[in-house]
Amino acid sequence: MIELQNVKKSFGETVAVNDLSLTIGEGQVVGFLGPNGAGKSTTMRMIVGFLGPDAGQITVNGESVLENPRATKTLIGYLPENNPLYEEMLVRDSLRFTQRLRAGAGGKDAIARVVEETGIEKVYYRPIGELSKGYRQRVGLAQAILHKPEILILDEPTEGLDPNQRVEIRSLIKEIGQKRTVVLSTHVLQEVRSTCDRVIIIDKGGLVADADIETLMSQAQGAKHVIVEVEGAEPVEAIKALDGVIAVDLLPSAAAGRDRLTVATEGATELRPRLFQLAKERDWIIWELYQEEVSLEDVFRNLTVGPERGAEDTEDADA
Ligand code: ADP
């Protein structure tokens, strides 16, 4: 279990982590999400003991990271951002080197075990500099799990990978995360959906959400929208008058003689059957009718930039 209590960290004037408190239980795969500069890497570096907090407490399985770094480092495997590896080393030698640095931790068979677990048999005798980004990440993960840590801290593990490599590394993380607690940072929302049980969102060094993904999505259901394209007299007023409708706005893309509308409704309202009914009563023709699902992107944007600025950042959020 990882516990942070009122943790703060600044770099000069920049407050990177601001009074952050969290608990991450055993066996969870947690997505640590936030825009660039939110404080994800800084938090992770403090959990693994590479940086000390200015204030607050961090414990791993009850041991203080500051007071007992040796014990907590044994419990944690860490894949840093950009996965720094010695380019000229063979994969075999880099694993041997890591094991020596860790005083032989993991035992005699550790290297064979991690090579199999991360699927790097094919590149075992290749220099790291010749490997694809996907294989480099596999080697980084192999190093991180050599000493059989219970907890894995992975900082942007799929950053810079192509889509196929992303899928492979995600499924590898899922596999090796089955028996461990995993915290992985990312700004790719798809990653969180496909890999994590729970999501922690931070922004400007502070916590903005901490929930399992389904809960987070259902909390956001208030933002449901129905899109309808209708041919008939004065639909805006009539739709506005329906129960549960918060707002009706005209969209610019309607065909001649029709109105295209976006209808915002309260969370539990199911508007579509009532729109059909209304169209029948008024003799309208419905050309199109669908409900827009709330996406994790919407939730993330609302929490970190607010809905009004969200549209500008869509591309960045799932780059
Ligand atoms: P994230 O991982 O979410 O992108 P970081 O933890 O890397 O965020 O950074 C949080 C803030 O702290 C940023 O404003 C960043 O510029 C600043 N920061 C991080 N590390 C350092 C450092 N070593 N020196 C100065 N500023 C830093």
Image: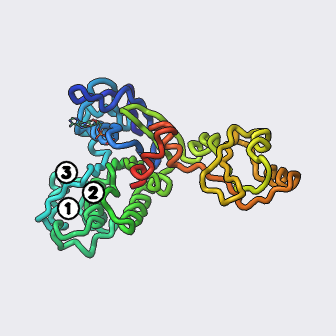
- Label 1 to label 2: alpha-carbon separation: 8 Å
Q: Answer above or below: position of 190 versus 10.
A: below
Q: Amino acid at mark 2?
A: Leu
Q: Amino acid at mark 3?
A: Arg
* Residue at which label 3 appears: 102
* Residue furthest out toward the bottom: 122
Is residue 67 visible in this depiction of the protein? no
Q: Which disc, if any, is residue 95?
A: 1
Q: Give the quadrant of the N terminus.
A: top left
Q: Amino acid at mark 1?
A: Leu
Among the 4 quarters of the image, the one containing residue 283:
bottom right
Could you say where residue 251 lies in the image, as x and y percent from the top left?
Answer: 62, 50
- Asked which secondary structure carries label 2, the reply is loop
Q: Nearer the viewer, residue 218 or 278?
A: 278
Circles 3 and 2: CB atoms closer than 8 Å: yes
* Residue furthest out toward the top: 55
Could you say where residue 279 lies in the image, as x and y percent from the top left?
Answer: 82, 54
Could you say where residue 290 lies in the image, as x and y percent from the top left?
Answer: 68, 56
Q: Is residue 290 left or right of residue 67?
A: right
- Label 3 to label 1: alpha-carbon separation: 11 Å
Q: Quick one: label 3 or label 2, which is nearer the N terminus?
A: 3
Quadrant of the image where one finds ligand 1? top left
